[in-house]
């Protein structure tokens, strides 16, 4: 009969140093990714503190007339926001790959998906600005845009499309394309709020990043999205009250 292997018993005190060393060997990628996330938040703070974030706000870009240049600059800053807000929730899927090259390819596709979303949002927003400034009836109701975006996000949080895409977005092991598609389908409405708030608006960044991380990481995803929907409805109330 073979003697029981010590490696099969993690509780064996003789194995504690070995297990600790093995853990350290398998964790360096986590240190790197947490460093990237922290650096992204520092850059976001710097963008807001120096006023660059204001220059990259979609309102400022529209009125400056620098649509192409401003759009490109905004998409560059969007990468910082994606790293700060979306990378924390994607880490389980990224680290499940193990190999650094696979992780990099996965994230390249993931960031590209969110960049495409930002480009479409920017194009639609420029069109909306043109409509508001060119049509008197739309200009009179410009103050309805913010509560409408909040209401849309709240409604989507409660929709079956959100529920299905969130389930898939919580699963490591999907291909990069399938994972990115599911996560954009799950989080586009919340990131539309982030786009509306403007690049590197730290309060909205923190709130929405926490909401999306909770939806992806907490055991009860449905409870998290219901709570997010309720919070968005509460945010609508002060915006609609003066209109009554």
Image: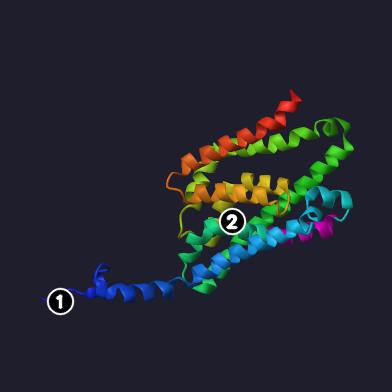
Q: Main secondary structure of the magenta part?
A: helix
For image coordinates 81% across by 47% down, the residue present is 59
Does residue 228 appear in this view? yes
Mark 2 to mark 1 CA distance (whole Å) = 48 Å
Pick out the residue farthest to the top. Answer: 244
Q: Position of residue 179 (x, y in %)?
A: 53, 56
Local packing at callout 1 (Cα closer than 10 Å; few below 14, some 14-19, many 20+) is few
- The span picked out in magenta is 67-78
Q: Position of residue 213 (x, y in %)?
A: 53, 51
Front position in the image: 143 or 131: 143
Front position in the image: 57 or 129: 57
Indicate the secondary structure of the residue bearing disc 2.
loop
For image coordinates 51% across by 52% down, the residue present is 169
Task: State the quadrant of the C terminus.
Answer: top right
Q: Position of residue 195 (x, y in %)?
A: 70, 49
For image coordinates 70% across by 54% down, the residue present is 200
Indicate the secondary structure of the residue bearing disc 1.
loop
Earlier along the polypeptide chain: callout 2 or callout 1?
Answer: 1
Residue position for label 1: 3
Q: Are marks 2 and 1 in contact (CB under 8 Å)?
A: no
Residue position for label 2: 86
Front position in the image: 70 or 20: 20
In the rendered view, would you say 171 is above or below 36?
Answer: above
Horizontally, is 23 left or right of 63 in the view?
A: left
Horizontally, is 116 left or right of 141 in the view?
A: left
């Amino acid at each position: 009969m073979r003697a029981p292997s010590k490696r099969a018993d993690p509780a064996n005190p003789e194995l504690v140093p070995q297990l600790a060393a093995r853990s350290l060997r398998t964790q360096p990628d986590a240190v790197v990714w947490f460093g990237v996330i922290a650096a992204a938040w520092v850059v976001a703070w710097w963008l807001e503190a120096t006023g660059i974030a204001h220059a990259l706000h979609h309102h400022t870009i529209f009125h400056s007339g620098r649509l192409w240049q401003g759009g490109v600059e905004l998409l560059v800053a969007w990468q910082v926001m994606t790293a700060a807000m979306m990378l924390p929730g994607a880490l389980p899927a990224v680290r499940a790959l193990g190999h650094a090259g696979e992780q990099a390819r996965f994230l390249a596709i993931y960031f590209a998906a969110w960049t495409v979303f930002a480009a479409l949002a920017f194009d639609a927003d420029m069109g909306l600005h043109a409509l508001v400034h060119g049509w008197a009836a739309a200009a009179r109701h410009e103050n309805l845009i913010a509560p409408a975006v909040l209401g849309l996000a709240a409604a989507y949080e409660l929709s079956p499309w959100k529920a299905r895409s969130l389930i898939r977005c919580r699963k490591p092991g999907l291909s990069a394309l399938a994972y990115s598609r599911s996560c954009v389908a799950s989080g586009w409405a919340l990131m539309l709020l982030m786009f509306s708030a403007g690049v590197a608006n730290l309060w909205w960044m923190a709130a929405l990043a926490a909401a999306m991380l909770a939806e992806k990481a907490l055991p009860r995803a449905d409870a998290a999205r219901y709570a997010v929907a309720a919070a968005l409805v509460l945010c609508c109330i002060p915006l609609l009250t003066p209109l009554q």
